[in-house]
Amino acid sequence: MLAELDEWRDNWAGTWSDYYGSVDKRTEVGPVQFTMGTAPSYARLQNALQIFSVKVVELKGTMLCWPIDVYGFIAVRDSVDRNRNYIFERARGNSQRLTEQDSSLVLDGPSRAVQLIDPVIFEVELRVKAARPSEDKLLSGEFFDYNCITGLYRAGSLLEEMVSGPRSTLEFKYAHLRLALEAQVKVWYAEGSTDFSVKFVARTASIDENVTLLECEDITSALSDDRSIDLRRNVVVVEGNNGVLIIGVEVKQQGNDEGTGNIYREVSFTAATSGESHGTFDVGFCKMSVVVAWSLLF
């Protein structure tokens, strides 16, 4: 499976490296470029891909068994610059443990909207950490595309892609959003207690599936000096024509028994082509403010 991936990379380099750099180059296009000021004439609503989750649903053969410690990367390439836009990226020393009961990867991207102008490519290279690097095993070395042209009829619905290789099957969940814009979410701790676990999610009103922005057992581990909360993911896409973005937070004070004391709050924002929207989470023992920056695509 890695041989086919390497061959694809060689072909990519032969076709695109003169224009976009090396095959392992990270995208340099940043998010929300047209939030403030007058947008250029080429800025517009654009079809985009909302990526919800990636899960290891099956281990194959006898070489791997649960639990597994996974590292490597998953990246998406679109025609904006054809470089890697990482949605999962971990070094060997920062592997993620997966169990049969909890086998979803903790995603940390994309860093900007994945635009659906031409078909996009998913590039997967995941490995399982062993006692020594020489004993590590390849979990998945695959590439596949989402053809946004032939898939246009499925726009606006939750899509599932099963990617199967010799040693694993991965489940990708994503959605094709028509005439979308980009939203960057920022959250600040305002006041009150910091003795709680937290989970931030985002979804659009049109699709009942969450993007997990952050999940941590101790909010202080995600707090920066300026009291901003370091979200693992902060870029989502929303339909631009009367679309609604819903940001939710679930908190649980430390010391509460499992399943008790959980509080959920959410705020809704109507999509805008520029500027910022502001909201507040009030969970009783603390307050947090949320800001959404909006931008057209190009």
Image (tube, rainbow, N blue to C red):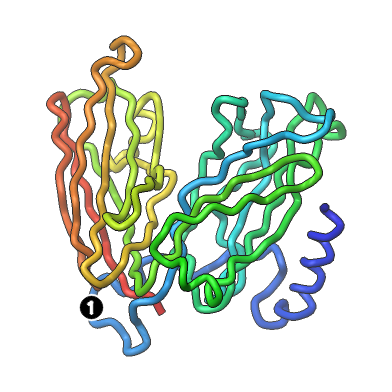
Name, please, the residue furthest toward the front.
Answer: 153
| Residue at the bottom extreme of this rendering | 41
Q: In the rendered view, tell whether residue 114 sits above or below residue 194.
A: below
Q: Residue at x 34, y 77 (%)?
A: 45
List x then y, in percent, for residue 108. 49, 47
Q: Quadrant of the C terminus?
A: bottom left
Residue at 39% over, 57% down: 235
Give the residue at x 82% y 33%: 61
The relative height of residue 8 versus residue 41 in the rendered view (above or below) is: above
**Residue 284 coordinates in the image, percent (x, y):** 12, 26
Quarter of the view holding residue 219: top left
State the image quarter where residue 169 is shown. Answer: top right
Residue at the image point whose x is 46% and y is 64% from the top: 49
From this view, report whether residue 48 is shown above or below residue 248. Answer: below
Say left or right for 8 vs 185: right
Front residue of this view, candidates 168 and 247: 168
The quarter of the displayed image where residue 175 is located = bottom left
Secondary structure category for the residue under label 1: loop
User: Percent from the top left, x then y, of residue 164?
Assistant: 72, 48
Left-right relation of 188 to 99? left
Q: Amino acid at mark 1?
A: Gly
Question: What residue would you read off at disc 1?
Answer: 37
Total numbered labels: 1
Q: Is residue 116 left or right of residue 263?
A: right
Crowd around label 1: few <14 · some 14–19 · many ≥20 (10 Å): few
